[in-house]
Image (tube, rainbow, N blue to C red):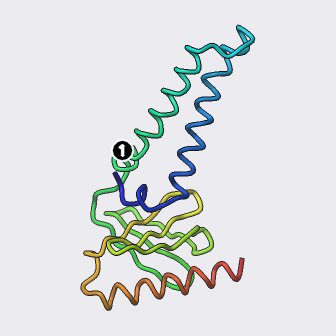
């Protein structure tokens, strides 16, 4: 399981809602054809919903970029670089900044996230300063929005 999956209620809620939507999509054709919900269709919809909810964390792990990433922050944006690819994310597009003992999560509005492990910092003082600045920049962006 990914750390984001374990930590983020928003991500889990999104997956559960999608699971229900997929289950509903599976149920619609039999209801339209037969006019009622059949037990077999209900079982199939349940299996689709459970399968999606169980497999999504593995999709997150597969999709996670494993290459070395450089991440920097300033009052306006988060800048990231992987190899020759780079991107900037304005703080106003950040949904949340969350901290656990082992990770700092910067989750974007589109549910993508930066997961920064404790080992990315040279010491606890540097990590604490990074967290303080993230929270400060995020709060300032929320106020100005």
Indicate the quadrant where residue 20 lies.
top right
Residue 51, percent from left and from top: 44, 32
Q: Residue at x 47, y 73 (%)?
A: 98
The correct choice, above or below, for 108 with respect to 145 in the image is above
The correct choice, above or below, for 16 with respect to 126 in the image is above
Residue 72, percent from left and from top: 41, 79
Say whether residue 43 is left or right of residue 116: right
Q: Residue at x 53, y 21 (%)?
A: 43
- Quarter of the C terminus within the rendering: bottom right
Q: Residue furthest front?
A: 39
Q: Residue at x 34, y 75 (%)?
A: 101
Badge 1 crowding class, 10 Å Cα cut-off, few under 14, some 14 to 19, many 20 or more, is some
Q: Residue furthest top?
A: 34
Indicate the quadrant where residue 130 lies.
bottom left
Residue 55, percent from left and from top: 40, 39
Say which of 1 and 144 sits in front: 1
For label 1, the SS is helix
Residue labelled with disc 1? 58
The correct choice, above or below, for 41 with respect to 132 in the image is above
Residue 76, percent from left and from top: 57, 81
Say which of 46 and 129 sits in front: 46
């Amino acid at each position: 399981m990914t750390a984001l999956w374990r930590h983020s209620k928003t991500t889990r809620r999104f997956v559960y809602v999608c699971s229900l939507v997929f289950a509903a999509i599976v149920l619609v054709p039999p209801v339209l054809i037969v006019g009622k919900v059949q037990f077999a269709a209900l079982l199939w919809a349940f299996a689709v919903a459970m399968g999606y909810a169980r497999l999504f964390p593995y999709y997150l792990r597969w999709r996670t970029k494993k290459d070395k990433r450089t991440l920097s922050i300033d009052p306006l944006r988060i800048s990231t670089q992987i190899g020759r690819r780079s991107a900037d994310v304005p703080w106003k597009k950040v949904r949340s900044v969350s901290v656990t003992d082992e990770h700092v999560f910067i989750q974007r509005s589109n549910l993508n996230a930066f997961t920064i492990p404790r080992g990315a910092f040279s010491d606890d003082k540097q990590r604490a300063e990074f967290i303080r600045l993230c929270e400060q920049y995020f709060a300032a962006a929320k106020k100005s929005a």
